[in-house]
Image (spheres, coloured by chain):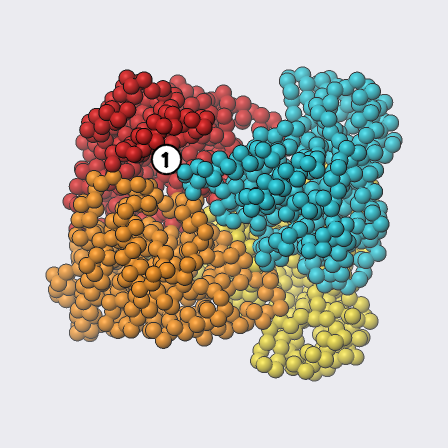
Chain colours: A red, B orange, C cyan, D yellow
Amino acid sequence: MISFESDYITGAHPKVLQKLIDTNLEVQSGYGSDAYCASAAEKIKKACGCEQADVQFLVGGTQTNAIVIATMLQEFEGVVCATTGHIHAHEAGAVEFNGHKILPLEHKEGKINADQVRTLLETFHKDESKEHMVFPGMVYISHPTEYGTLYSKAELTALSQVCTEYHIPLFMDGARLAYGLMSRQTDLTLQDIAQLCDVFYIGGTKAGALCGEAVVFTKGNTPAHFLNRIKKRGALLAKGRLLGAQFDALFTDNLFFEIGRHVIDMAEKLKAIVAQKGYRFHLDSPTNQQFVVLDKATVERLRQHIAFNIWEWLDDNHAVVRFATAWSTTQEDLDKLKELL
Amino acid sequence: MISFESDYITGAHPKVLQKLIDTNLEVQSGYGSDAYCASAAEKIKKACGCEQADVQFLVGGTQTNAIVIATMLQEFEGVVCATTGHIHAHEAGAVEFNGHKILPLEHKEGKINADQVRTLLETFHKDESKEHMVFPGMVYISHPTEYGTLYSKAELTALSQVCTEYHIPLFMDGARLAYGLMSRQTDLTLQDIAQLCDVFYIGGTKAGALCGEAVVFTKGNTPAHFLNRIKKRGALLAKGRLLGAQFDALFTDNLFFEIGRHVIDMAEKLKAIVAQKGYRFHLDSPTNQQFVVLDKATVERLRQHIAFNIWEWLDDNHAVVRFATAWSTTQEDLDKLKELL
Amino acid sequence: MISFESDYITGAHPKVLQKLIDTNLEVQSGYGSDAYCASAAEKIKKACGCEQADVQFLVGGTQTNAIVIATMLQEFEGVVCATTGHIHAHEAGAVEFNGHKILPLEHKEGKINADQVRTLLETFHKDESKEHMVFPGMVYISHPTEYGTLYSKAELTALSQVCTEYHIPLFMDGARLAYGLMSRQTDLTLQDIAQLCDVFYIGGTKAGALCGEAVVFTKGNTPAHFLNRIKKRGALLAKGRLLGAQFDALFTDNLFFEIGRHVIDMAEKLKAIVAQKGYRFHLDSPTNQQFVVLDKATVERLRQHIAFNIWEWLDDNHAVVRFATAWSTTQEDLDKLKELL
Amino acid sequence: MISFESDYITGAHPKVLQKLIDTNLEVQSGYGSDAYCASAAEKIKKACGCEQADVQFLVGGTQTNAIVIATMLQEFEGVVCATTGHIHAHEAGAVEFNGHKILPLEHKEGKINADQVRTLLETFHKDESKEHMVFPGMVYISHPTEYGTLYSKAELTALSQVCTEYHIPLFMDGARLAYGLMSRQTDLTLQDIAQLCDVFYIGGTKAGALCGEAVVFTKGNTPAHFLNRIKKRGALLAKGRLLGAQFDALFTDNLFFEIGRHVIDMAEKLKAIVAQKGYRFHLDSPTNQQFVVLDKATVERLRQHIAFNIWEWLDDNHAVVRFATAWSTTQEDLDKLKELL
């Protein structure tokens, strides 16, 4: 069955897999001290244009979010994010499991803005009983957001400024960063992001790796004894090479960006098909997740032939569904979709 | 450089890797609901001779230990283990990070016995102030132990009986179970273990997989909403197929046991070489970890040519070092070692 | 200075203090096993008309909320409450510190209703990805609410029904329950509450005790080894008699209800004064917390003579302030307030 | 029945109770911002001869231990203590509940020494895999210990030096500090303790208060936002005056020390009686807890008339029992004991 269910429905991009094959028999030391983690980190630092960056490899997105947040926050602090933020809605309470409260702000198409953050911070610090409350200690954004939307350079700069002013870090969840960077409608480069965020991660799982996220601490701000703290949380791989080799491949010869471009190309074609067939978009997404309004009958009919997610029901008869393109999406998949729509 | 540093120094066994290659382009749903996790679980249940078993896949050993312990214990309970237990000594306090105390017992060559456990339980339950103490709520053993030693069937049966009597689960850390099962000196089969333990895991990482541990709950005792609880701890892979496919390969055509046999064969040859060369063993290990006493000069000389671990210093001039064989250890490696010794 | 700042500005009601004096030299065993805890528990069970109730004494409100919630929830569950709920807004993230997420619902004058709860539960259980989310595992309400408002018997019954239907407990924070029970506008008795809630507590700290909250588990549902679990959280008093003796006094000769009546009488007089002087109420509160809209100049003038809390700023020039009456509030205090207004 | 069960069997010392009576009707602000907390803190600082000290009031011992340890440790650190340490043996795993491992050292009559600590620290920091282990981040001692024994000035100085050298704090649990300070066999003053420890607490509960422990941070090292962190743990009293007034009384006119002297006098007399009657001491305790070896028949006979604790059974027929004197112990109690022995 053709699937637009997500961007993690197939294995690794052939070049990523090839790297695992090529390096399989080499002896490498464990726990992230192998040559490939080192090499990948260097390549990522270079791609970020950020010499003082520190790159750490983790296995998955929820794990990365919880660890970055918990190790950067003080015990009395919580994290500000959009009500639609993945950490708030779909990570099984992993942040709270680590002892921290999420302080949600109303989203607009998945995004929050600097004015909201400033108001929250100002209000908090004027409150006479603030010592009885959770301190806003970090701002979390996802880019692309859970609705596929993107922050502009101006928006990210404004968020960065308010965070700097209040001395709290700005953290970008880049599980799908490849698609944000290669969107036809973005003005943000990887270098911009490295400059404006205090910490962010480059998603591998959803961009052609079997697993893996590369966390970039951009300001000499890696939490002390980070290895011990990820071990404590069960996130340290014995064969860390699995992560190193994959990211080494992704950041060799621009593979990461090429994967991003292909997936965006597929998404743009998919958008054109949907529009041409007269279906309505729930919102305008410039990345690889497309949210389309379908009636119930159409949902049921399509599901017999194509896999996709129901995002939410607008009413008893209309659902927002998500079509996601992936590194393995082909022109044939799109032709088939066109035919079915 | 030749390495006897550990059993996780190379990538995957070729047949495991081949399975990843063969299945790479298939569309599979995420989060462990793929066909390979299902297939691997069936094969493992069959190998265990335990139809009611439930098999869950996790990524690494520390993660598995912490999750099994924390999800099976009540809040007022702790876990009994040997002072040498991996969870007590080398997992960065992951059990305590989950809120539970470890109740250590003195070890003998890495093992604890049923009498010790019974005494601890009897003493605890007679204590007038036991409500102010941590309840012993589980027994953790590793098999092979951290010293490579093994429980006999009689010893495991006795431990199982005392646990059953006190209604607490017996948990076996099987990170290196392949080498326990294929040791020439064991009388315990996988079926025995499935019958005597309430929960155990079959280590993949140290037996030819890139990563992965298969947890077997043997008594219909999987903690409720286990998926949610591993997600909350950042242990749920989006591409769960990575674990499923590898264990499917390991449990096809007896590969897991063949890997075990090869590694044990290499270990027995290594033992013979060490003995023949006149070095002293720290203890008699029937599995793939061999602990040898070397003087400082020898340690330094060998380290220029071979990688291995210093386990502990007996005095200023003598160290216990560990040589571990792995799926990728070859006769050439042994010949080279012989020459150097 | 006269203070309407809160209901915990003075020590203990004279009869409560007298009980401490009378029993001071008696030898009593520790950790809640004294005669007064036993006696107070019996009296409370009788007052609740609930023979199967189990009464446990804790020290303060935030402690009680966190412990009841954390010991009754499963690890995969969170607690539903109003956005204004004390646990959500003013308890320093104590629930999240215990690992649980709060699932907030929009409030109306501090209250939530059964329809909101039902919609949340229905939506959750229909969600295809619910295993990746936090399960709604309890409903928390405060009565009186943080705005002094009250649930009617019909409203509480409806909440109780939806909780029963979904097999989750209904928990009432009764830090100011005395004022809810003695309000002139309530139709809920203590017996009703014991019947409709699965667990609730009777606040002592804000009703004439030096400290202390009496938790009532109404359905044989006290969490196992509760003493161990409160000890683990540092909430077990060595001299538990301090709590027992105070609640024994409060539930002797209707003292608790008499204190409630006095405080409500004072509040009603205060309301009349404020209304007569032409000030506007932010909302209509039938209990001892009165929320009044004052302009900035009036706030500043009054603060020179009377202590009270600024609740929130409506705009740059208008604040909602809170006047609270207490067991120690006198007619003279009210006369003085009248004069100043 | 006469009781030597503990030092928390009666209410408050009359002068402490009188202070609560005298201040009962005063209006005081909440959460520790009252005049009595301020006054008591000043008096304690003066008694400690430590102007830069910061004094914080908490409710009970387990709470205080867990909070001090958890707020002073980093996430990757654990706490070193004697195997007999109260935090290790009798606090229901409160330290582990806060996520931290206890690193126990063998005790000698309840004490540990500087050499043991130094060896542990040296060994740890030389270990090649220390990043996989829990860092020793604090040393916890109790004074008097759980066996009533005391550190000498030389011993405490040596412990302080090794802690300073390794940049980790030395924490003294002073739940029974009054009896350590007033022992006839001590050479340590309160000022010495304030100088040698980084943090310690002065126990109120076991020295004549209804509840309360005064934590003294001696080096400008109070954890940031301490109030928020104790609130988060349910340890912040609304009527903080309850703690302030009691400690204000204890540190007025040397009451704390007078209570200590009386209790020690009673203990010395008790020792003399026990010795004269020919019973054997389990060890030589210079404070208010006396550990005596009794045969089973004597235990059973005495228990009909006197309350005391069975500490441990040496064999089937011999127990170590504890007799503790308290502020309320009288000459009549001792006469009665003498008669019974």
- Residue A262 visible at all: no
Q: In this view, does C35 lie to the left or right of A35?
A: right
User: Which residue is disc 1 drawn over?
Assistant: A217
Image: C316 above or below B216 = above
Q: Horizontal placement of D327 versus A67: left or right?
A: right
Query: Where is residue A260 shown, x and y percent of the image?
Result: 25, 28
- Where, by quadrant of the figure, is residue D204 drawn? bottom right
Indicate whether D202 appears above or below A14: below
Which quarter of the figure has residue C220?
bottom right
Across and down, in percent, residue C119 comes to: 53, 34
Q: Position of residue B86 (x, y in %)?
A: 38, 60
Identify the residue at horizontal 68%, vertical 78% (top origin): D299
Q: Which amino acid does label 1 sit on?
A: Phe
- Give the position of the N terminus of chain D as an image quadrant: bottom right
Q: Is residue B47 above or below residue D22?
A: below
Q: What element carries label 1?
A: strand
Q: Which quadrant would the C terminus of chain D be assigned to in this image?
A: bottom right
